Image (cartoon, grey):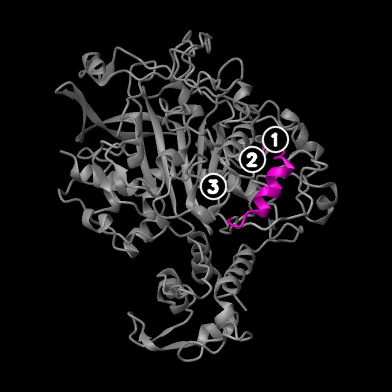
Amino acid sequence: MTSHRSIPSLSLVIALAASCTDPFTFDNKPTRSAGEAEEICAASAEWLPVTPAINLYKPLAHPASECPFYRGGWQNFLIATQPDAQGRPALQGYATVDDLFTSAAPHAHRDTAMRAWLGDIKQAGGRQILIDTSGHAIYYGIHVNQGYVDFINAHNLKTVDAVKNADPNLFFPAGVVEFKSAWQEVPDGDPSLGQYISTKAWVPHLRVVGGQIVEDKNAPRLVTVRLLALHVVFTLPGHPEFIWSTFEHSDGAPDLTAADGHRNVAPVHPGDVNPLLTDPNNQNDTTVISQKDHILFRAGTTAQAGNRAIAESELAAAFDEATQTFSRQTSIYRMFPASKSNTTDPDDAITSLNFNVETLFTQAQAGGHLDPSDKRGHYRLVGAVWMDKPIYFGHNSPIQNDLSSPFVASVGRAKFEQDIRENGSDSALSILAGEDRLSSTAMESFTQAPDAFPNCFSCHNTQAITAKGVPVDRDSQGAVLLSPKLLNISHVLSQFVLEETAP
Amino acid sequence: MVCLAASVAAGCYQPVDDGAIKGGVGSAPLGSAGSGGHSVALETPPIEIDEQGNTTSDACVPTRTQSADILSTYCAHCHGGGDAGAHQGQPPFDFVLDTPRLKTAVSATVKDPVTMAPVRFFLPGAPLRSRLYVRVASGEMPPPDIVGLPSHPRPTISDLSVLYEWIEHCASSSP
C-alpha cells in the first residue's frame, strides 16, 4: 500500500460490516494508518550469493504490510536467475512447455540446433509483435520450477486430453513458480552484456507465409540474447491464484522507482501521470514521452503514438528474412508510472525493497562475494498483483475490481466504482492487492490501457481460455481451448494445448 | 511495513542502523545506499502471525494456526468432540482438532489406493492420501445442505490451499 493512500469513508466501512452477505466481521482495532512511519521492506543478507528457497506461508492481508509478497517475488527472481558456472541463468535449465508435456508430434529436445528454446514472438491478448529499435523481434520464453513439474506429473496432466479433462476444481498448491521472460537479440560480445543477464539461445527462424509472420521452432538460429524483463509468478499457501510479480532491467543505481529514470527498457510519461479517465488510451495526449532512445522506445514518440501495434500484414511487408529484421519498429512507454490505477506514487514497500536489494548487491560486490558473472543486481521489481481477498478465488471467475466483484451487490455500483477509482487496490472493496495496473512494457506492451488488459488477472483467471490466450468473455468469437477451471489461471497449460491444436 | 509507533517495539521489523552501510560504497555500479530516504534493512523480517504483533521465524506456525482455524470453522462443530454433533462418522470421528490423534486414525471403510491398507485420516507429506483432506477437497465434507436445516459453510479454495500445505509440509512437525 502507498503511504499516501486515502482512507475509505467510515460510512462505507460500516455499510460493509452491516451487510449480511459480507464475510468479514467489523474490526474496531486501530488500523495502521495512525502514526504511519516509513514503510520498510527488508531484503535478506542470505539471499546472496546463492539464494535459498522461499519460506511458504500465507501472509496477512490488508492492512498488514504487502512486503512478504514483494519479497517472495524478489527471492524467486534471484533463484531463477542465479548464474551457473558458465554464467547462464538457472532458468535456462528449467522445464518449458516442450519438457512438461507429451506432444502428439514428437520434436527434438529444446535449446538445440533442432529445436528453439525461446520464441512465441506474438504477445498474449492481441498477438501483436514487439520490435526493438534495431528491428529485431523480442523473443519470449515460458519456464517453470520443479514444483510445477511435480504437480503436472502427480496429476498426469501430460497430454491435451488430460489437460482438457482436468478436474475443474484442481488448483495449484504452494511452491509452484512459473516465469515468462523477454529477451533481446544483440551482437555477440555486445559491450552492454556486462550489465545484463545474457546467454546464447536458439530462437525460431522467422519467415512470411501468407502475409503472416511464422516461427519455425525446428529450424532455429543460435544467437546472443540479453534479458529485458521477467515475470515471476508464484503460489503461496492460501494464494492458489498466484502472486504475479514482474521485473525489468535498469541501467544503474540509484533505481528505486521508474521515476528515477534508469529503467532503460521503456520510459514513463514525463509528467509522471496516469492516463486521464476521459482519455484512457492517451489518444489525445501529444506529449513527447522522451527525447532519448530506450530499448523498446524511439526518441520523440508522443503519448498518442506510443504503444501502438503494427498490423501483421504491414510487418510482413517490412520483414527481411535474410537478416531476420523488420524495417519498422514499435515504440513503447509505461502508461502507469507506478503500475497503480489511482496514484503515480509507487508503493513504499517496493521502493524500500528495491533499495535494500540494491544495497545487498553493493555490499556483496564490495566484499568480493559476488561472482563477476552475476548480473542479477541490474534488475528491479516493478510491482506485483495478487488477491487481497483470496476467498473469492473460485471457478469461472474474472478476478477483477469490476462489476463482477461481489462487493457491487453489497454496497451498490456507484459506491463501489467511486471507492475503487479513488483508492485502487487499497480500497476496502478491492479483491486485488498490489499493482492493479501492472504490465510489462516488454511483454504486455500494447495492452496496458484500462480498457485492454491492464493487469495480470485481466488474462489470467479461471474462465474458459481462447486461442488468443485470453478469457472467453474478452474474445467471444475466439476458439475455446480450455473450459473453465481453476488451473486456467496459469497459461502454461493453454499454451501447450494451443501449440498442439494450431493448424 | 506501516507500523504504529507502539507496534514497532512489539515486533514490527526495525531497520539495521548501520552507518557504514548507509554510507554505502557509492562508487560501486550496482547500488548506492542512502538514496530515496530509505533505511537499510538486510535482516530477514519475522513472519507476522496476527495483527496483534505476534511473530515467528517458523513458516509452519501461521500455516498450523490458519489450518486450525479452518477446521474449527468448518469441521469442529460436528467433529470436534465438544459439541452436540460430536461422535459422528464411522468410526466416531470427534477429534478433528487433535492432530496427534488424526495422524494415527484410519478409515474403517476406505483403502489407501497406494498401500491398500485402511486409508489414514492424516498422512504427513501426502494430502491426497489423507482422508481428511480428500473428503473436504472433493466437497463430500461438510455434507450437502438439507432443505429446512441450517446450511453448512464451506471452506474456500484458498482454505484448501492452506490445509494442503499444512499436511504436505508442516504436519510432520505438528504437535
Q: Residues within 10 Å of mark 1 (few under 14, many from 20)?
A: some
Q: In which quadrant is the N terminus of chain A drawn?
A: top right
Instruction: Look at mark 3 in the image and give the residue it sits on.
Output: A409
Q: Residues within 10 Å of mark 2 (few under 14, many from 20)?
A: many
Residue in the foreground of this view, choosing between B85 and B93: B85
Amino acid type indicated by mark 2: Asp
> Which corner quadrant of the image does residue A312 belong to?
top left
Task: State how far apart marks 2 and 1 are (Cα).
Answer: 7 Å
**Comes first in the chain, label 2 or label 3:** 3
Task: State how far apart marks 2 and 3 are (Cα).
Answer: 19 Å
Q: Is residue B126 left or right of residue A11?
A: left
> Which corner quadrant of the image does residue A298 belong to?
top left
Nearer the observer, disc 1 or disc 3?
A: 3
Amino acid type indicated by mark 1: Arg
Task: State how far apart marks 1 and 3 are (Cα).
Answer: 25 Å
User: Where residue A334 sits: x, y (%)?
Assistant: 51, 23
Residue A370 highlighted magenta (yes or no): no
Residue in the foreground of this view, choosing between A134 and A446: A446
User: Where residue A75 sits: x, y (%)?
Assistant: 56, 47
Q: In which quadrant is the C terminus of chain A drawn?
A: top left
Marks 2 & 1 on one chain: yes
Check if mark 2's residue and mark 1's residue have beta carbons within 8 Å: yes
Residue in the foreground of this view, choosing between B134 and B149: B149
From which residue to which does the magenta span run? A1-21
Amino acid type indicated by mark 3: Ala
Up the image or down, A347 lies above or below B3; here it is: above
Instruction: Look at mark 2 in the image and give the residue it sits on.
Output: A426
Instruction: Look at mark 1 in the image and give the residue it sits on.
Output: A5
